[in-house]
Amino acid sequence: MTANRTPAAKSAPARSAAAPESMVDENLRRGRGARSNHSGRFETERRTSFDDGWEGLADLEALRTEIFIEPARSIITRNQSPDISFDQSINPYRGCEHGCVYCYARPSHCYLGHSAGLDFETKLYAKTNAAELLEKELASKSYTPKVIALGTNTDPYQPIEREQRITRQILEVLERTGHPVGIVTKSSLVLRDVDILSRMAARGLAKVAISVTSLDRRIARAMEPRAVTPAKRIEAIRGLSEAGVPVAVMVAPIVPGLTDSEIERILEAARGAGAEEAGYVLLRLPLEIKDIFREWLASEFPDRADRVINLLRSMHGGQDYVAEFGRRQKGNGPYAEQIALRFRLALKRLGLNERRHALRLDLFTRPVGKGQQMPLL
């Protein structure tokens, strides 16, 4: 096997699909979402593996998940985007083993010198000191309580959480300090922490949103290869609801020409399981994702590939993606308006979003930091 090194282009034109030689062998990437592992946009060289005639590619092992311990310097991230519903968030992990091919967090892996492709789902970073840092940041006299969102970049309940338990440690701190939390996940592992979440919910301190992209098991497995099945996500909604935890369903992302026909069925299934709120986000293809998604689409659904991309571009003024606030998540144009109307009508028919669960901020008790004096009363 030989690796070619060529200068990385500053910007590459959109392609309908990757050249076959640029895609990693199917046997090596089995169970993964991305089809390639192109160098990130900050790298000065691009590396391409090819068979030089010595049959070196046949000796390569299948990609394995690697976990790196990352001692974080701070843990609460602040957000000022006007079209995002939270002001601050925590991401216990970088990278995500779920391997969702559409994941908007993929480009963030390039800041680590990795690829947004297969590296994103195989090279994972665990912030093992997250709970300790959180308690320290909450103890600061300058801290003002606002809802903390978990799962805004990568899933806090991805498979490695079973062993790392960082998300649970964070919840333990938040429960102890009476701090509100909102969680977004597509994993049924959230039910492991239903003991904490139900106690917090009883005090108005917790709610959960479960992401359901498709009820079609074949589409879900291809698009989100290491996430739990759609049926298990619906059961997670049921389990949380029965435990008294307010649950929303996120139909996200909606892929035009592939999953948009399922909007009503997803909302019906979620409502039947106990969801009270719902939202949606249109497929977004910024930066490296536009090529990663095209590669996947061409290999999994070649008969629909052109239609999906053409519909998506029609909702972004002829482009793959428009980053403008207010448009980037919902798009515009006739097809986007049709999706929005269908969603609104389904919400009204099913009685979703009639009640919004606002989380309480008045129960927060500042933890005592090291060297601080405990309150007398």
Image (cartoon, rainbow, N blue to C red):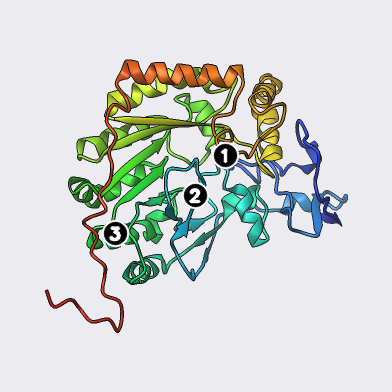
| Chain-order first, disc 3 or disc 2 | 2
Along the viewing direction, whichever of 265 and 280 lies nearer the viewer: 280
Residue 174: mark? 3
Residue at the bottom extreme, as displayed? 371
Task: Left or right? Give the position of 193 relative to 27.
Answer: left
Residue sitting at x 39%, y 17%:
346
Residue 325: mark? 1
Measured in 3D between alpha carbons, the distance from the residue under mark 2 to the one under mark 1, in whole angstroms, is: 21 Å
* Residue matched to label 2: 154
Task: Left or right? Give the position of 77 relative to 167.
Answer: right
Callout 1: helix, strand or loop? loop
Crowding at dot 3, Cα within 10 Å, few <14 / some 14-19 / many 20+, comes out as many
Residue sitting at x 20%, y 39%:
244
Name the kind of residue labelled 1 in the image.
Phe
Crowding at dot 1, Cα within 10 Å, few <14 / some 14-19 / many 20+, comes out as few
Name the kind of residue labelled 3 in the image.
Leu
| Chain-order first, disc 1 or disc 3 | 3
Q: Position of residue 37 (x, y in %)?
A: 70, 49
Name the kind of residue labelled 2 in the image.
Thr
Callout 3: helix, strand or loop? helix
Residue 357: mark? none
Tell me the quadrant of the picture where the C terminus can be found: bottom left
